[in-house]
Amino acid sequence: MVKHYIINSTNEIEEYIEFVPSCYQMWKKYLDCIYVLAFITDRDKSDPLVKRVSEFCDELYLFKPIDGIHTGIQAKTIRMWLATQFGEDVCTLTDIDQYLFDYKWLMECIKPAFEDHKFVAIGHDVYYGTKDEGKFPMYYTSGSSSLFKRIINHEEIDNFVNWFNRFREIKDPIDNKETIGPVFSDFSDESLLRYLIVNHPDQDFIKECIVKKNREKCEKYKCFDRLDRSVPYKIEHKESFEKLVGVYKLKDCNPLRPFNKYFIENKGILDYFGLDLDEKSIML
């Protein structure tokens, strides 16, 4: 039976790492999956924070920060690399600071990854009519691990650092966001994945394996079935959130962050998932 790996990553920045407990519990509650977390840190397995983080994943991989690279860039990119490590099992890339409400929608979208050995990219239509047309969001991208490997590492480079360092200099960039470096805002992992797809030496393979799924309720970067942190909200009660989900048919949420600071504002969402809100269970 094919296994389903949920691949996630974080560095030590509070905006991201504080979501580790709730994100893990959410995915495990609603999907039969193996939750994999990459942690960019100088700490070792004996460190108290690493031990605490390890409670909220099925498999934890520690990666040392690479000199001259923002750890956020490393964290974003390492999801693609980890997704190449699990043979014929299916991997889905996700964001650490994102909650999913409509699991049936997601599983229906990525069905070709399980049934037809396809690489599923969701949300090209988010960028239609923008300067980023041709890209798609990294989150929810799904496919067998062997497909991930053939797409992003067809040269079969044997370790993450050597593969990663190839992108310090790119001579023929598409939008100049592919190159890794010290400035987080200068990089887009979506741009890097697009670059690898567009420049893959076997374009017949690319055309055959990639399945594009539209998000549908979106227009020029905006998703109208998402609760987004760019619009302030405060949802303290489960009942209030259930009504919100029903009216707007929400698929997912980019919650207010960092997690601890906006716990009250997000409480209704967490309660909606039925998560244990005890401090020992939900906070690092």
Image: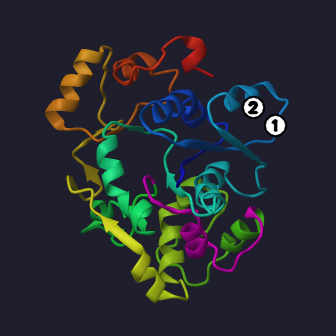
Is residue 14 in view from this perspective?
Answer: yes
Q: In which quarter of the view is residue 270 placed?
A: top left
Dot 2 amino acid type = Val
Residue ID at (55%, 74%): 151
Q: Is residue 157 part of the magenta span, yes or no?
A: yes
Is residue 188 in view from this perspective?
Answer: no
Q: Is residue 20 part of the magenta span, yes or no?
A: no
Q: Which mark is residue 43?
A: 1
Residue ID at (38%, 25%): 273
Q: How many marks?
A: 2
The relative height of residue 243 versus residue 156 in the rendered view (above or below) is above
Q: Is residue 273 left or right of residue 147?
A: left
Residue 127 is situated, as x and y percent measured from the top left of the image, at 31, 64
Dot 1 amino acid type = Arg
Q: Which mark is residue 1?
A: none
Q: Residues within 10 Å of mark 2 (few under 14, many from 20)?
A: some
Q: Which mark is residue 50?
A: 2
Q: Is residue 101 left or right of residue 29?
A: left
Residue 185 is situated, as x and y percent measured from the top left of the image, at 53, 55
User: From which residue to which does the magenta span run?
Assistant: 139-160
Q: Secondary structure at mark 1?
A: loop
The relative height of residue 129 versus residue 68 in the rendered view (above or below) is below
Q: Earlier in the sequence, mark 2 or mark 1?
A: 1
Separation of marks 2 and 1 at Cα, in angstroms: 7 Å
**Do the CB atoms of the residues marked 2 and 1 lie less than 8 Å apart?**
yes
Q: Residues within 10 Å of mark 1 (few under 14, many from 20)?
A: some
